Image: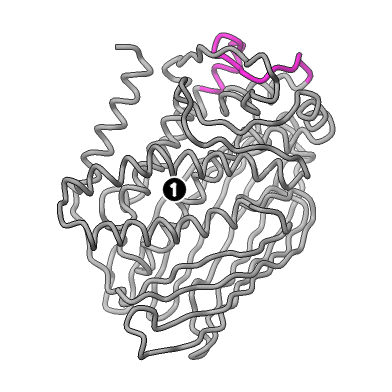
Amino acid sequence: MKKSECLKSIFLLIIFFLQDNYILGQDSTLTTTTHYSIVVMDSPAKLFTMRQFNETYVSFYGYFSKSLHTHVKNKFLISLIEPLVQGLVLMPLTHEEGHRSILTAKGIGSISQPFFNKDGLAYVNGVSDQTLIDLKTDDPASYIRLHNGGLESDYMIAKRIEDMVSFDMVEYQYYDWEYISRKAGIVQYIAMGLFEYEIDKEEEENELERDIVGHDVYGAVRHLFRPDMEFYRYTRYKDLTKPERKYLDNLGYHSFINLLNPILFGKPGFRINKDIKVNFGAGHMLAPFGEFVDENVWIKYKNYNISLYLRQFHNKNNWSNGFGMGLHEYNFSDKITINLSGHYWSQPQGYSFNTSEMFSGQAVDIKIRYRLWNENNKTIPGFSYDIGYVSKTEGFFPEEVILEKHSGFRMGFTLEIRN
């Protein structure tokens, strides 16, 4: 068995055991209604931004999984349908949308082909070589992020599920497969270099049929180390230099940090007393200048849902810090619900892979839901009109597709469906 096949088998076994909660068992939640949020318009007002697609997708997946568990009584059939739909359709769809959203934010048209082709690959294509060369020359940070966009999207989908599960907003059983396979997929992709996984794929003759970046991580590493080298899309392991392979190994080891969360083992937090529940976890993801590591804490105190994180950014040789705090689904009144978060970062100047000089930035994000009630409706007792606002300075803010200083609104709605 090849090393790459061995790696895949290991992750499939991990998913199997965790999916059935053999280790710690699954805690039940006290959720009486589930909120399904749909983002109709985000900023920039182009379909779709990464946040817009991710937030809407997480709502769709929860409803899909709950409907499946409700209407299909055969558990074995559920265990076949859910992995097939999520693994063959939904995961490549969201991953490729993450890539495509970076291009759309830069005003570059592209085509998402999220269904696996004969080579077992999903693509974003329809972009000429010269367009990508121009992006690489004029905006190297966005070009690197174009490689990382799919994994960044995967990471933020998992983070949304962690928020909801930690605060008892959803029942974990409806998200367990999505969450576990998403986490395992992130680690598998970034850790491929540890097993010297080689890509045996030639670039298509028609440049518009080529994937925009090829292997996400190999391509990102090559361009971080050698931004001025000859342009081509499909980076192979053999193309990487010894220092690049060493850095790739470090990324692979760091990716296992994503498995540090009790939710993976069916434990959605720890009850301290009747008023306090806490959870904790860690994460790792790629950035336009290298990578970052998160340490997350979730605190549920009575009706307050508070999230905290510390974040360490890393380019080639230098570390810098960030942190943030959020208040989730706080009922300001019977009709008004507020989500509010603040963020701070110190990142490499010019998003450089090599510099030791840093700059600071901040962001604030608010979402207000105006709720309408209809208690006579047994299925949908609540509906809300949602408006959000984000304001940020220069800097990389995960899931926000614009690196430059930016302020923008988003609008949508939320359905509250009784369990």
| 240 drawn magenta | yes
Three-letter amino acid code at disc 1?
Ala
In-front residue for pair 168/96: 96
In the figure, 158 relative to 303: above or below?
Answer: above
Q: Quadrant of the N terminus?
A: top left
Q: Is 47 drawn above or below residue 274 in the view shown?
A: above
Tell which residue pokes out farthest to the top in this image. 238
Is 364 on the left or on the right of 71, as rendered? right
Q: Which residues are magenta?
A: 228-248
Look at the image and say whether residue 17 sits in the magenta stretch. no
Relative vertical location of residue 182 with respect to residue 175 in this rendering, above or below = above
Report x, y in % for residue 416: 42, 76
Q: Residue at (23%, 63%) from the top-left corner?
A: 70
Write down the residue under mark 1.
Answer: 282
- Relative to 194, is 13 on the left or the right? left
> How many residues crowd around disc 1 within 10 Å: few (fewer than 14), some, or many (20 or more)?
some
- 353 or 399, nearer to the observer: 399
Residue 147: horizontal and vertical position, in percent? 63, 32
